Image: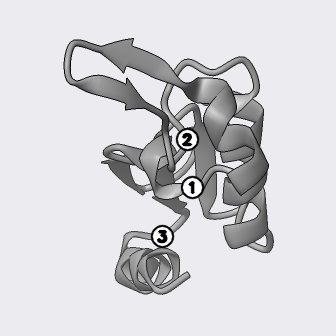
Amino acid sequence: MIDATTGHEALSFMDGSSGYNQIRMAPADEELTAFRTPKGIYCYKVMPFGLKNAGATYQRAMQKIFDDMLHKNVECYVDDLVVKSKKRENHFYDLRKVLNA
């Protein structure tokens, strides 16, 4: 990611806070995440961080959302985003484009 930001005048770093938890589990897979507590048996309805394929699923979602911007104005790593602009005066436009995606 560091190499991909070289030569850009403006960078904004964003953390996809609870990003994995924004992706719904397939209903058929919910019961596979079941766990027991003293208060009962529960299962996840949204994807928790740490499942075997959670990272790949999240990355696929990011690629779908930012398809035309990845490796041009946006870099994605795990649940972090970097919005980058070659010229500082274009950075506000690039940020707006990412936030509206």
Secondary structure of the residue carrying tag 1 is loop
Colouring chosen for the image of the structure: one colour
Residue pictured at 57% horizontal, 31% vertical: 78
Image quarter of the N terminus: top right
In this view, 2 is above or below 20? above
The reply, left or right, for residue 89 in relation to residue 101 is left
Q: Quadrant of residue 24?
A: bottom right
Residue pictured at 42% horizontal, 77% vertical: 99
Total labels drawn: 3
Q: Quadrant of residue 95?
A: bottom left
The percent coordinates of residue 61 (x first, y second) are 71, 57
Q: Mark 2 and 1 residues: CB-CB less than 8 Å, in contact?
A: yes
The percent coordinates of residue 38 (x first, y second) are 21, 13
- Amino acid bearing label 3: Lys
Which residue is label 3 attached to? 87
Residue pictured at 70% horizontal, 54% vertical: 27
Which residue is label 2 attached to? 47
Q: Is residue 93 visible?
A: yes
Q: Nearer the viewer, residue 90 or 14?
A: 14
Secondary structure of the residue carrying tag 2 is loop
Q: Earlier in the sequence, mark 1 or mark 3?
A: 1
Q: Earlier in the sequence, mark 2 or mark 3?
A: 2
Q: Nearer the viewer, residue 27 or 99?
A: 27
- Amino acid bearing label 1: Ile
